Image (tube, helix red, strand yellow):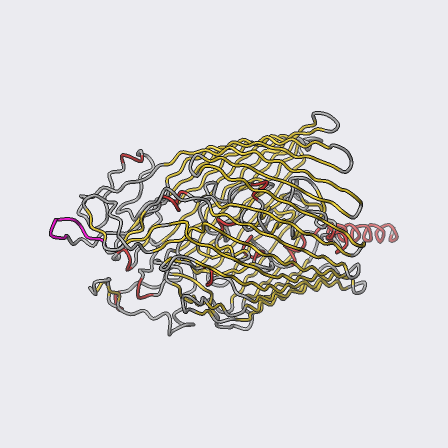
Amino acid sequence: MATSVMAEDTMAEDNDEAILDQLLALSLSELIDVQITTASKMEESVTDTPVTAMVVTKRQIQDRGYRNLLDLLKDLPGIDIHASNHQVNLHTIVMRGHINSDKFLILQDGVRIDSPTGETIPIAENFPLYHAKQVEIIYGPAAALYGADAFGGVINIITEKVPEPQTVRAGIGTNYYRYYSAHVGKQLTGDLSISAGGHAQQADYESLSTDYPNTYQFGDVETFSGKLYKSAAEREDFYAKEKSHSLFARLDYKDNLTVGVNHSFLRHPTTVSENPNVTQYGSDSQWNTELTSAFARLRYDISEQLSGETLLHYATYEIDPASRFKNIYVDYIDAYIYSKGEKYSFEQQLAYQINDAHQLIAGISYEDFYSIPKTTDLPTPYNKNVPVNAQNLYHIGTNNTLPIEIYELEYDNHAFYLQWQAKWRDDLSTSVGMRYDKNSRYKSTFNPRLGIVYHPSDKTTWKLFYGEAFRAPSPVNTHEAYGIFSGQQNEQGEYISYFFHVPNSNLKPEKSRSIESNFIYNATQNLQWSLSGYYTEITDRILRPDEEVTTQFIPGGQILSSQHSENIGDVKQYGLELASHYQKQLNSDWQAEIWGNYSYFEIDSKQKDGADDEYNFFSSPHKLKLGTTLRYKNRYVFTPKIYAIGEIDSKNKSQKTPGYTILDLHTQAILSKNLSLSLDVYNVFNRHYYNSGSDSRTRLVNVPQPLRSFLFSVEYRF
């Protein structure tokens, strides 16, 4: 009897270890050959794909404490993260010098989940990773397959059909941070499966007046004209809450049909990075971003050599009508903003396997768009129950006499793409592709791609590729108008405005041409090095110059100064990225994973005098990121991460952001097959440091960053 009990205990322990092992991911040798689909829309290994690509696995997401996409991007080479530095975008993300989220695509299971009409959106807790099987990152232009906005790269979150194990998670942290997520699923029949999940999060932004007293002083608040708005004694306490939630579901029938939906919401304060002497803190100053995406993908075989894939996709982007500013730039009047984008699309792809060495992929797509571009400052919230032309809203400061024109756009895009993948020898393969897009707003673009992959030996891989891409001018680029009137009138009785941003519907796409070389060296079965060098030329950049002759585009009003968007910028940028990855079982108890990367970046930016060009202010020339994961008995995880970011000198703006070095720490204890605890410490050594940023009128500023903070989490698996 005792022997039987001991045997049962041993089997239980072995089962526990097997389940714990499921939480882990691939060995380094397996990581080298992990399969991805993002680069070529076909399954291939990371080393064979004709671009610079990275994969972050489920285990790495867990071991490094990534809750959301922003956390993950922070560790990648060539990425600058400027946190809490913008009133609308919240964080500024720069990918190899390409500023903001409209310069790269965010996909989930190959379907776009960021703004369908190309607006810049916040990337924060609204892109969670609780459901990610792996995240695939493609560097460089990818318009030859994906079309508009695949300018600097593509990020694809791959989800699990049925999560193993299923999880619920809760976290609590500094500044009233709260986080909850769940991911569940079931194999309903032998062919049919379903998975679903969601998250909710909230936090209070910390008042920096104590930690940075020289920058954040709560004094009297005055308008531009010098009129007292509120004395220091009358001012409200600091208030800046963030909230987010998301929902996700997918239904799979065999490998033939996938139906999915993804929804996310983020609320953040529009007082982000604003100095207390120019803004009114309070619950009313908020920016609400909502994104929804739904798709159905059907895969089928037509013959032994020919297969097809049909994709139907619907997506929306909306800025909630409650979004508003209340600062010196709107004379401390409640100024509301609204925007909406919508897309219906159809894509048909065919893959033809000519023989074992050659494959063709061809596709056509049609996209139908509708947009209400970001409005000017509205005196009351936009009414979604009333047509655009019946809002009856008037410019602030005109005593309800000058009506606001709210734009409404309908446009479409037709595209055709073709790709030829060829393996000439075991050690040599090529990829040639192109895509033609015809858009009813900005006519047509043609974007080719060429890649060569050569394996000189079993340990080395060399890639060389050239690609072109374009960023479509979004509706907000072409039709955004903002500004207010002062309430004063000139001799002709016209209301006076000191400044307005003027629409320009004639913008062309920005165009990039890039060449890159990527060398991968597997020094041992435990150690890999990679080196990438790239050169990119960007033309027709959309900048915002001040106008020499002011545009008077509002009848009955006199505008004293104005600016508009225009295709006037050219950029040459180049860089190097060195990355290393080491992974080894040290002994029977200890495992180690060490990774790191160094990025060097330079830029030569040319533009018209007076144009607002921030390219030089958001990319550090030198970035070093190091991390180590030590794992003891597959139960205890210790992951410190170091970020050494160099000084940023804007040169033409005479503005500098000092460099900094900080340490973050993630620890985890896997107590059983069901339960684990984790503790994250951010800015462990409590360093004062700054990120680059801008205020409501895009003036460059240095934004103080929070000191040490903590997050404690519990995860239950079943």
> Which residue, as the protein is rendered here, is positioned at the far top?
302
Q: Residue at x 49, y 46 (%)?
A: 471
Count of numbered marks: 0
- Nearest to the observer: residue 336 or residue 448: 448
Q: Which residues are magenta?
A: 490-497
Q: Is residue 621 magenta?
A: no
Q: Above or below — where is 230 with respect to 266?
A: below
Q: Is residue 657 left or right of residue 420?
A: left
> Principal SS element in the magenta part?
loop
- Nearest to the observer: residue 525 or residue 517: 517
Q: Is residue 161 left or right of residue 682?
A: right
**Percent x, y of residue 340:** 40, 40
- Nearest to the observer: residue 269 or residue 141: 141
Quarter location, residue 530: bottom right
Q: Above or below — where is 55 with respect to 305?
A: below
Q: Is residue 491 magenta?
A: yes
**Percent x, y of residue 695:** 37, 60
Q: Is residue 665 left or right of residue 694?
A: right
**Percent x, y of residue 100:** 48, 53
**Percent x, y of residue 199:** 53, 48
